[in-house]
Amino acid sequence: MKIQAVNIHKAYGSRHKTEVLKDVSLTISKGSYTVILGASGSGKSTLLNVLFGLERCDSGSVLYDSTDITKMNDSALTAFRKEHIGFIFQQYYLLENMNVEKNVRMGADLVQNKQYHEIIEAVGLKDKLKQYPSELSGGEQQQVSIARALAKNPHVLFLDEPTGALDEQCGRQILDLDYIMRLHQERHFTILMVTHNQNIAETADTVIRMNSGRITEMIENAHPKSAYEIGW
Amino acid sequence: MKSGGNMMIALKDMKKLTTVSVIACCAVFVCSLFMNYQWDLASVEDQIVNEAGRMMFEAQIASGKVTIGVTGGCLVITSLIMLVFYIKSYIDTHGKELGILKALGYRNIQIAKHFWIFACSVCAGCGLGYAAAYFYMPTFYEIQNVEQLLPKLSVNFYPLSALYLILVPTLLFALIAIAYATLKLKHPVLDLLKNRRTGKSYRSRKENSACSFLHDLRKSTLRTKKTLVFFVAFSAFCFASMVQMSISMMDLASEEMGMMILNIGLILAFVTLLLSLSTVVKGNMKTIAMMRSFGYSDASCTKAILGGYRIFTIIGFAIGTLYQYALLKFMVSVVFANMENIPFFCSASVFYHNDHFYRCL
């Protein structure tokens, strides 16, 4: 899916407004792997949340192909996310009282995906099927989160600092998951990742830099690197 | 520690205890009315000379005991359970802050002693109920003696009633709050910091792969939040018993008294129900948020998260209705056991004398 953001404005607070997004416009082409890069407080996570409809912008539009999600009501937006969006957060947000399999089924059952075992195996959690999140390492929990998102067969996959809470080795493993990339190639879904780590940006084919709520730069990367070729 | 402890329990946390205040207010309102009336009535006992007046006196003393016992007792237990439940959920949701204090070296009792502040809600409710009772007392005395069988009573103030109905409950609830908090704070520091639950009972290795996510979620929600299940059932129990009490009082008492008890009962019933519903939603907020962001519809979330509690609500409702009916029947049969001409149960507050029926409540 092609994503287009047009003149997005977003501010927090009622009396003393803090502008977080200032007239942000961007286009993300279908099947691309884009990284939004910026320091803490630059507005990148807010932009991500606005793009996938978790937060509403004050003005502007977000178009998926020709569908404007800013005009949708809550139920329509929920239905839209169900059909098109997968996401991975820095904090994993797994359901603590459900085992690995059931956490992945949270995504799979939504789209009647019976092949979810394949995804669990591909992310390397075949032996941990019946384990609970608290019994897994941070990296493994993030792998569950990835499997859960992919099990939805999304058209767009959003990742918000997916390696932010992980050490270097786990972080590289997450980024180097062949399965994500293979699926990305096969299904041609769009990946949009937010990070503050400049090195990670080298793995993407498009890099958008943000500072103080504005897009300052957009770079096409002709030779994306693998997770093991970049510094950390 | 003093400032740290005070900062830990903020005023906004107290606001959530409004339910406890409302219940305490209603309990003290009813108890104050009847307690004061009984004491004032007892002070004129020797002025009652005729037989009808004597019977009215005895019937009113007896029915007052029933009302204080049933209403006061029931509401004290309700507010106690509400308070304990609230402290538990407070500790569950503020585990990190409490864990940090413990990690810094504060002893359990040093932290727990600040939980006395929760008893302020009881104190506020009791004070309000007590004041409201005195405000309503002149009208109440007139209603009670509408048949003019008793000497005219004036409202007297008894400092002892303030002690029984405001100070004692406040101190008792403060002590319970501190004791319960001390008990709950015995969890290891790391468990509090990482919000880990003790015990492994919430984990089931028997989860069936064939079951859908929503089906398993419903089961695990109930399994992991047993106290919430208890609270929901208890709320339904309270709701049913209060409605039952209100309706019974409509039969037992005069129209005005019946309406008063009915209104109090219904307020309490709905307040309890509201608290229960908001607690269930709050307790499962994280799961609901994740499901909504994944694209599960409101209906699916409601069915999976709230659907499991339905059976416990029905059970609570059934037990509450039966319990209140049996309690009232028991109290009436015990209190009025030795009184003549008092018809059993349904018209316990009505007695017959010289071809006339009189209401004593």
Image (cartoon, coloured by chain):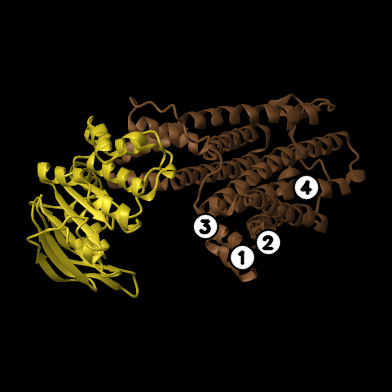
Chain colours: A yellow, B brown
The answer to whether the residues at label 1 and label 2 have Cβ atoms under 8 Å apart is yes
Q: Can you tell which of label 4 and label 2 is closer to the viewer?
A: 2
Q: Do labels 4 and 2 share a chain?
A: yes
Which circle's residue, 3 or 2, is located before the other in the chain?
3
Which circle's residue, 1 or 4, is located before the other in the chain?
1
Q: Which residue lies under the disc numbered 4?
A: B35
What secondary structure is found at the residue carrying circle 1? helix
- List x then y, in percent, for residue B288: 37, 44
User: In the image, which disc is placed on residue B110?
Assistant: 2
| Closer to us: A168 or B82 | A168
The answer to whether the residues at label 1 and label 4 have Cβ atoms under 8 Å apart is no
User: In the image, which disc is placed on residue B200?
Assistant: none
Report how far apart the C-alphas of labels 1 and 3 lie in the structure: 14 Å
Instruction: Name the kind of residue labelled 4 in the image.
Output: Met
The answer to whether the residues at label 4 and label 3 have Cβ atoms under 8 Å apart is no
User: Which residue is painted at 39% across and 43% down in the image?
Assistant: A95
User: In the image, which disc is placed on residue B5?
Assistant: 1
Report how far apart the C-alphas of labels 4 and 2 lie in the structure: 38 Å
Q: Could you tell me which chain the residue with mark 4 belongs to?
A: B
